[in-house]
Amino acid sequence: MEEGGSQVSFLSSALSLGIKMLNIPKSSTTGFKKNVILYICTTMTKFAHDNIVPSKDSLLSKKEQVAGMFDSIAGRYDFLNRFLSGGIDLWWRKKAIRQLKKLNPKKILDVATGTADVAIMSTDILHPEKITGIDISDGMLDIGRKKIKKLGLESTIELLNGDSAAIKFNDNSFDAVTVAFGVRNFEHLEKGLSEIKRVLKPGGKLVVLEFSKPKTAGITQLYNVYMNLVAPNVGKFFSNNRTAYKYLDESIKKFPEGKNFTLILDNLGYTNTYCKPLSLGICSIYCGEK
C-alpha cells in the first residue's frame, strides 16, 4: 500500500465497512469517522510524493534537486506552461486567486512563486498592499524580478529565496498565502503546510492550486498519454530537459489529491477546508483557513 493519500483512503473505506457491518445508524456516526482518521493520521507525516525526485541516482536531497531542475528550465518555464496547457493555466491561476476576493487580503505570501505569475496576477485581482514571493530556485526568481520590473511593480512585489519548510517570517504575518503548482515539490508536505499556517494571521486563508488526476473515462486515458509521452518530449525539445516533465507526471501520480489533501489540512488544524476540481479534474484548488 502506498503512503499518504492511499492510507487515508484505506482508513476511510475500512471504517465505513466496520460501521456497516455493525449496523450503526449513520446519525450516530456523524463526525466519528473523520475524527478517527484525523487521530490516526497524526503519525502519518511521510507521504509517497515526498520521495519522488527528479533523479533517483542523485545523492542530493529533493529540495536541492528541485531547485537545480527549475534553474535549468527557468528561461523556458513560462513559455512551456502556456504551450503545454494551451494557455488554460492562466485561467486556473486567476480562478485560484479569486478564492481570496471576499477576504480582501492586504499582505500576501506566495510560496513557490517561481517566475511570479500568481504574485503579478494577484496585484491586478486583489490589489494588496504587499506581496512577498519565495522560491528555492534563483533562476526562476531572476526571471520573476525582470517581469516585475518591466511592469513597474517593485514597490508591491518582493521576491526572496526561501524554503517552505522554514519560512523566515514571524507568526501571524500574512492575511493570505498562495501556492500554485508548488506543494508537490515540498520535501516535507506537512512541514511546509504547518509553516504556512504558522505565518498566516488568525482568519487568514491558504489557497493551493495543484495538478490532479482526471477520473472521467476516456479523459483519463488521453491524460495519461499526454503526461507520459507528449509533455516530456515537448519539454526535452524546447528546454533540453525531459527529466523535469517526467518528474511532473510521477509527482502528480503520488500526490494525495482531493479529499486526501483536505484531510491533511484538517489534521494540521486548518478550518473550512474545501476542494474545487477544475477542467474535468486535471487541476484542483484547495483552500483552508487558520
Image: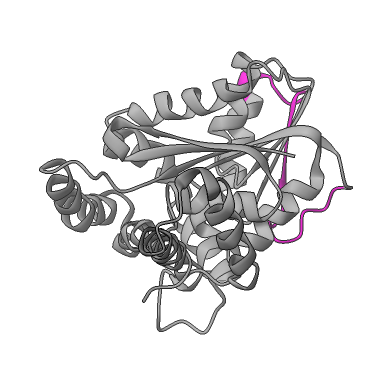
Q: Can the viewer see residue 223? A: yes
Q: Looking at the picture, does residue 53 appear above or below residue 81?
A: below
Q: Residue at x 44, y 63 (%)?
A: 15
**Residue 53 point in image, percent of width and height:** 44, 71
Residue plotted at (47% across, 23% down): 95
The answer to whether 258 is drawn above or below residue 96 in the figure is below
**Number of numbered discs:** 0
Image location of residue 61, percent across then percent down: 57, 76
Q: Is residue 96 left or right of residue 14?
A: right
Write down the quadrant of residue 192 in the picture.
bottom right
Q: For residue 156: magenta? A: yes
269 shown above or below 18? above
Main SS class of the magenta portion in the image: loop
Magenta region, residue range: 150-169
Residue ID at (14%, 52%):
225
Quadrant location of residue 173?
top right
Q: Nearer the viewer, residue 264 or 244?
A: 264
**Is residue 131 left or right of 21 when viewed as pictured?**
right
Quarter of the rendering occupied by the N terminus: bottom left
In front here: 52 or 148?
52
Quadrant of the snapshot with the C terminus: top right
**Does the magenta portion include 270?**
no
Q: Position of residue 195 (x, y in %)?
A: 74, 54
* Residue 86 placement, left or right of 121: left
Choose between 15 and 186: the one closer to the eye: 15
Residue 176 in view, yes or no: no
Which residue extends farthest left? 218
**Could you tell me residue 174's position as x and y percent?**
80, 35
Which residue, as the protein is rendered here, is positioned at the far right? 170
For the point 53% across and 36% down, which residue is it?
274
